[in-house]
Amino acid sequence: MTEKEKRMNDARFRDAAGTAALLPFPELMREIARAADDMAAGRLCAPARQAVPFPHGAVMLSMPATAADVGIHKLVNVAPDNRALGLPTINGVVSVYDGLTGRLRMQLDGPTVTARRTAAVSMLALSRLLPGGPRHAAVFGTGTQAAGHVRALLDLYPDTRVDVIGHAPGRAETFAPSFGSDRVRPAGAVDPAADVVITATTSATPVYDQPAATGRLVIGVGAYRHDLAEIGARTLAGSQLFVDDPEGARHEAGDYLQAGVDWSRVRSLADLLAAGPPEAAAVFKSVGCAAWDLAAARCALHFDHS
């Protein structure tokens, strides 16, 4: 057996730290751009995720995707009530398979893949919609997705200040210092100087509903069901609208659904990457899809030297 064959048979599980090490943001962003192009061209198959409810309010999500070089299956459980127990709300694994033989290549930590690829999708959109990069960001939320976005901003934009806005009293004051950077600070509201606002909560009602403003990009990542909404109708009405996955967004983008947006106004991430940014204020909504997990798998395989 050759060394390559031995590596292909060594389908080890990478824990959270090991998974994160295989997913540096610049390279992950490039793989997501490639996956968006592949999906638009029909070279990548990523069917709608299947959601299977647990009796007590949690949900199991099954998300497969395939391309010529690789296939993945992400199986994660989302249990919002775990927050009150001091437990992670997302648990699961991403299995990575060889695209030709179907053999298992590796398994990645599901929550880490989800957090990093979601942040990378946001950063990819940000790089197109705010080409000069942010100077001052405001992030709503203190959970895993918020942490992923703060980390991405710190890694990619070393001069950017990041304000963290928490829902519960004292949450942002505890969350902000965990990054060990004086560029991350707790805040009570969005500073007028903020040029990017990122909402990463599971709120049922909008946490941001300011009038659309040219020069301020709004990114929503937390509302993943039709009954959740982080961004208000006033913001959406005056903005050019984008989504990462149009098919999934029509069922899961609660912000857009509750505001009754005209879907003919909404452009995809692939459209954004091909055509470039609009001149008007913009909102980018991310609901996630298995194509981005496949992009993460490609990135992980590239950096895996075990």
Image (cartoon, rainbow, N blue to C red):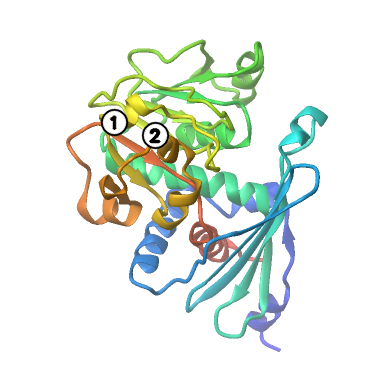
Q: Is residue 111 visible?
A: yes
- Identify the residue at image location x=50%, y=77%: 69
Label 2 sits on a secondary structure element that is: helix
Q: Quadrant of residue 304?
A: bottom right
Circle number at residue 259: 2
Q: Residue 240: image x %, image y %?
A: 26, 38
Q: Residue 51: image x %, image y %?
A: 65, 56
Above or below residue 152? Residue 78 is below
Dot 2 and dot 1 residues touching (CB under 8 Å): yes
> Which part of the image, by quadrant, shows the C terminus?
bottom right
For label 1, the residue is: 237
Which of the marked residues, 2 or 1, is nearer the chain's N terminus?
1
- How many residues crowd mark 1 within 10 Å: few (<14), some (14–19), many (20+)? some
Q: Quadrant of residue 10?
A: bottom right
Q: Quadrant of residue 88?
A: top right
> Which part of the image, by quadrant, shows the N terminus?
bottom right
Distance from the alpha carbon under mark 2 to that under mark 1 = 8 Å
